[in-house]
Image (cartoon, rainbow, N blue to C red):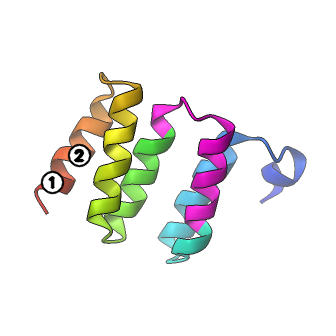
């Protein structure tokens, strides 16, 4: 991905690339990108919410729940994480 070549610390580039890799069923590579994004910006709840969405869509419900909870720990008002958590807990 060009953005990561230009700036390896581009947190959102890692997160969006991770999401794309999950969508291509390249889960391990996607996980690696989300880990990189979280390392760059550990206090960003949206990263964990997006990571939870990717995990949930790939059938890893328990892992998704953990990421949604982490997002809500950082930002209890993050509605998208609350919705994701609620949906994941229903599975």
Give the number of the disc on residue 77. none
Going by the image, does 5 lie left or right of 70?
right
Q: Look at the picture and state if 39 lies above or below 28.
A: above
State the residue at coordinates (59%, 49%): 15
Q: Main secondary structure of the magenta part?
A: helix
The quarter of the image holding the C terminus is bottom left
The answer to which quarter of the image holds residue 26 is bottom right
- Give the tally of numbered discs: 2
Q: Is residue 76 left or right of residue 55?
A: left
**Residue 9's x, y, as percent?**
78, 41
- The residue at which mark 1 appears reads as 89
Residue 77 drawn at (x, y percent): 30, 21
Residue visible at 51% across and 41% down?
Answer: 47
Residue at image x 26%, y 46%? Answer: 84
Q: Indicate the position of residue 32 as horizontal and vertical percent values.
A: 62, 62
Task: Magenta stretch: give its range.
Answer: 30-46
The residue located at (54%, 29%) in the rendering is: 43
Q: Nearer the viewer, residue 39 or 50?
A: 39
| In-image side of 9 versus 13 (left or right) | right
Q: Work out whether 23 lies above or below 19.
A: below
Q: What kind of element bears circle 1?
A: helix
Q: Secondary structure at mark 2?
A: helix
Mark 1–mark 2 CB contact (< 8 Å) = yes
In the rendering, which numbered label is found on residue 85?
Answer: 2
State which quadrant residue 21 falls in. Answer: bottom right
Distance between the alpha carbons at the discs numbered 1 and 2:
6 Å
> How busy is the neighbourhood of tag 1: few (under 14 within 10 Å), some, or many (20 plus)?
few
Binning the other alpha carbons within 10 Å of mark 2 as few (below 14), some (14 to 19) or many (20 upward) gives: many
Q: Residue furthest right?
A: 6
Percent x, y for residue 39? 65, 43
In magenta segment, residue 36:
yes
């Amino acid at each position: 991905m060009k953005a990561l070549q230009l700036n390896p610390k581009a947190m959102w580039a890692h997160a969006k690339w991770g999401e794309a890799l999950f969508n291509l069923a390249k889960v391990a590579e996607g996980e690696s990108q989300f880990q990189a994004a979280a390392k760059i910006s550990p206090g960003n709840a949206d990263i964990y919410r997006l990571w939870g969405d990717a995990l949930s869509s790939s059938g890893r419900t328990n892992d998704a729940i953990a990421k949604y909870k982490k997002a809500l720990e950082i930002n209890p008002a993050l509605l998208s994480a609350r919705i994701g958590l609620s949906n994941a807990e229903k599975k």
